[in-house]
């Protein structure tokens, strides 16, 4: 069992506890093997990584790159496919570019490691780049690096607004978040 757990933990997101729960569930419900096989076969046959944006293609079609209804001049830069899926379910109508992580010099993750050059190749004078990297130190380093390289190569660079989340209370908001919320306030009436 420990060997199987170690192999499962090689998959991102599977912890010891989740892996153990998964394996025990399969042992107790042997009929779920067929379901698992179906899922794995479907993934193997119909899904692959999009060479352009790093999202995934289903049946050789990327919902971002191959959709001519999307604004090809608005590129949202994200760090993961999960974030892109969330964006897909929103009202965002541009395309995406998914970095494979963020720059982290302490872990030897450089711009080359996260395939940032593929992003630069997609940008031209008509492009607006919407930076949606995480609001962490590494996310800011990544965003600042991108800005430094593309500032003269695109029409506009924007960043997701920062501030108080819906349902948030001022009592629990840190000072930096409050300052960002004030700086990024929306005009209701002029």
Image: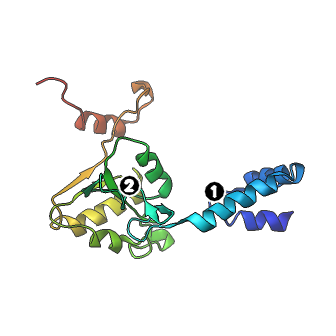
Q: Check the image and report above or below for 120 versus 160.
A: below
Residue 41 % position (x, y): 67, 64
Residue plotted at (39% across, 26% down):
170
Using the rendered view, name the quadrant where residue 182 is placed: top left
- Among the two numbered marks 2 and 1 on one chain, the one whose residue lies closer to the N terminus: 1
Which of the pair 51/152 is nearer the observer? 51
The image's colour scheme reads rainbow
Residue 119 % position (x, y): 32, 68
Q: What is the C-alpha distance between the residues marked 2 and 1?
A: 20 Å
Tell me the residue that label 1 is attached to. Answer: 13
Residue 126 % position (x, y): 16, 61
Tell me the residue that label 2 is attached to. Answer: 133
Using the rendered view, name the quadrant where residue 163 is placed: top left
Residue plotted at (87% across, 63% down):
1
Which of the pair 105/163 is nearer the observer? 163
Can the viewer see residue 16 in this picture?
no
């Amino acid at each position: 069992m420990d060997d199987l757990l170690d192999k499962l933990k090689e998959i991102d997101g599977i912890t010891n506890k989740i892996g153990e729960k998964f394996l025990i569930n399969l042992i107790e419900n042997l009929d779920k093997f067929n379901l698992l096989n179906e899922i794995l076969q479907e993934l193997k046959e119909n899904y692959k990584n999009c060479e352009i944006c790093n999202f995934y293609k289903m049946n050789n079609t990327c919902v971002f790159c191959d959709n001519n209804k999307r604004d090809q001049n608005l590129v949202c830069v994200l760090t993961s496919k999960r974030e892109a899926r969330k964006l897909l379910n929103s009202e965002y109508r541009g395309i995406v570019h998914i970095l494979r992580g963020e720059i982290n010099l302490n872990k030897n993750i450089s711009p080359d490691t996260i395939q940032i050059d593929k992003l630069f190749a997609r940008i031209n004078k008509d492009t607006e780049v919407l930076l949606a990297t995480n609001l962490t130190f590494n996310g800011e380093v990544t965003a600042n690096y991108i800005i430094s390289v593309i500032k003269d190569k695109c029409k506009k660079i924007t960043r997701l607004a920062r501030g108080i989340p819906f349902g948030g209370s001022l009592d629990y908001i840190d000072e930096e978040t409050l300052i960002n919320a004030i700086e990024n306030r929306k005009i209701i009436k002029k």
